Image (cartoon, helix red, strand yellow):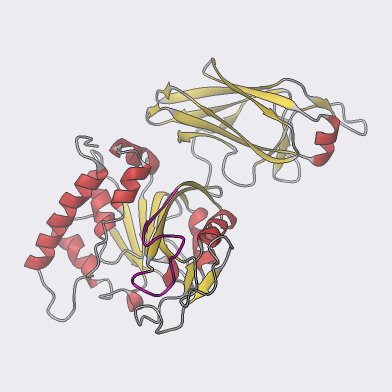
Amino acid sequence: MVQDKSLRARANDFHEKLAALKNANPFEDRRWYPWPSLGSMDTLDEFLGGDVAKLQRLIGDLPVLDVGCGDGDAAFFLESLGDRPIRVDCIDYAPTNYNWLAGARKLKQLLGSNAGIYEVDLDRRPELPASRYGLTLMLGVLYHLKNPFLALETLARATQHIFLGTRIAARTPEGDLDFRTLPLAYLVDEDELNHDATNYWIFSEAGLKRLMRRAGWEVRHYATVGADASSADPVTAEGDARAYVLADSRFSEAPDGFHLEGGWHELEFDSWRWTERCFSVSLHLNAPLARPVLRFRFHVPKEAYERRRQFMLTACVNGRRLRQSVFDTPGEHEYRAEISSLQPGTIQIDFELDRAMSGAGGDERELGVLVNFSGPPPISVALG
């Protein structure tokens, strides 16, 4: 992927290219989607720290999905970025698409694109074109869905990362109720927001973040643009604030090359494994990573906490010792440590606890921490 321009600059160039194509190829009976679809790339560029290569690493070897694609501007833009082919799929519900997807199909032809264009109703039949995606774009779509939880959970099971943008609100239209810090959503009336009956739920910041978490997403970056997020309302132009989220799925399938090495006990209850005091995994990386973050999610049951109030956990990656962390409460935990750099290939990750426990009730096993394997791998290495 070319890296001499930021994502923002390249998106601006591509927007001008699309504008010229659309001006030169008007519809006879319909119109091009009138709103700028690539403005959100400014925020994604900020999330990625100006490093276009990070976007390629997020996508990996899997395709990209553009949900509620409009004319497909964002999907075609991502398709244009790679120094190797990036497969993109565009989905939208034709009856609510601005031009019944004619714009996306016409741009595909004009650009000579290989993108897939599909009609999908996420509210009723959320069937995606492919089973796995590296990155999903979902920009300006969430408030058009009657069932946003269903859509986000469906996507979390099929894609590893999501870049989402949606309108948020902190106050009711009259301003008499401040619900910014409450996990709520305002249901707009059919003609209350832009006289568009396909608008439904406008979430508060707290509501959006809780929805993302419960639907299977871990928020990596969050930002707002537009109106002041503390005074935003769900219906007026002056109160229009947008939240942008870059998140990682907790439900997507394990990547190829994730293997348990030594120090793991047998699977229990179809989901959980105890570790020993020392335990290891190996992962395979397809591309180099600069300053990635090692994440390890685990659980300390209350009974185990009462027998061992505090413990220290240390990790080594390819023999390089990382930070030591202390854990002194029961419940869910995450160990995080930054790594200077990693090269492609198989990496070895070794964990060590300062002490373990013996099992209760005649269980003679050495027990460390409890790890859930019902979702994506509990141990990952990715850009922070």
Q: Is residue 233 above or below residue 137?
A: below
In the rendered structure, which segment of residues is drawn in magenta? 222-238
| Left or right of 331 in this view: 61 | left
Q: Residue furthest left?
A: 24
Residue 129: in sight, yes or no? no
Residue at 33%, 50% (x, y): give it.
43
Q: Is residue 373 left or right of residue 127?
A: right
In which quadrant is the N terminus drawn?
top left
User: Looking at the image, which is closer to me, 47 or 177?
Assistant: 177
Q: Hey, which quadrant is residue 137 in on the image?
A: bottom left
Pinpoint residue 286: horizontal percent, then vertical percent: 40, 31
Residue 239, visible in the rendered structure: yes
**What residue appears at the point 80 percent right and 35 percent down from the top-left corner?**
305
Q: Position of residue 245 (x, y in %)?
A: 43, 52
Image x and y of residue 302, in percent: 81, 40
Q: For residue 225: magenta?
A: yes
Residue 241: % across, % down: 39, 63
In the rendered image, the residue lying farthest to the front is 176
Residue 336: quarter of image: top right
Q: Residue at x 56, y 50 (%)?
A: 251
